[in-house]
Image: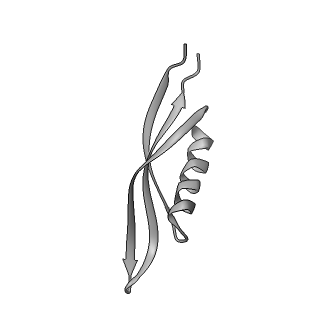
């Protein structure tokens, strides 16, 4: 029987939402083992001088706990 845990992270990128998601998963993978899925719960942008400067995502990462 597997037991899963969910943790929430925030990640950003100056390029795109997709890149922010990839950055978040890549960084989470350095610390968390057995990542199974990610749910993007929220999108946000930062605006500087009338243009988007950062794309920000809040994700819920699901990973399986070791036995």
Drawn side of residue 47 relative to residue 13, left or right:
left
Drawn side of residue 20 relative to residue 52, left or right:
right
Toward the bottom, the furthest residue is 49
Q: Is residue 12 above or below residue 35?
A: below
Drawn side of residue 51 relative to residue 35, left or right:
left
User: Residue 47 falls in which quadrant of the image?
Assistant: bottom left
Q: Position of residue 19 (x, y in %)?
A: 57, 62
Between 43 and 33, the residue placed more toward the observer is 43
x 50%, y 43%: residue: 38
Q: Is residue 59 above or below residue 57?
A: above
Q: Position of residue 10 (x, y in %)?
A: 44, 53
Position of the N terminus, as image quadrant, is top right
Q: Position of residue 46 (x, y in %)?
A: 38, 72
Toward the top, the furthest residue is 1
x 46%, y 67%: residue: 55
Position of the C terminus, as image quadrant, is top right
């Amino acid at each position: 029987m597997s037991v899963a845990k969910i943790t929430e992270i925030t990640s950003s990128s100056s390029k795109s939402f997709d890149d922010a998601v990839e950055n978040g998963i890549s960084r989470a993978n350095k610390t968390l083992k057995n990542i199974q899925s990610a749910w993007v719960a929220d999108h946000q942008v930062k605006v500087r001088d009338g243009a988007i400067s950062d794309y920000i995502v809040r994700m819920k990462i699901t990973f399986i706990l070791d036995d």
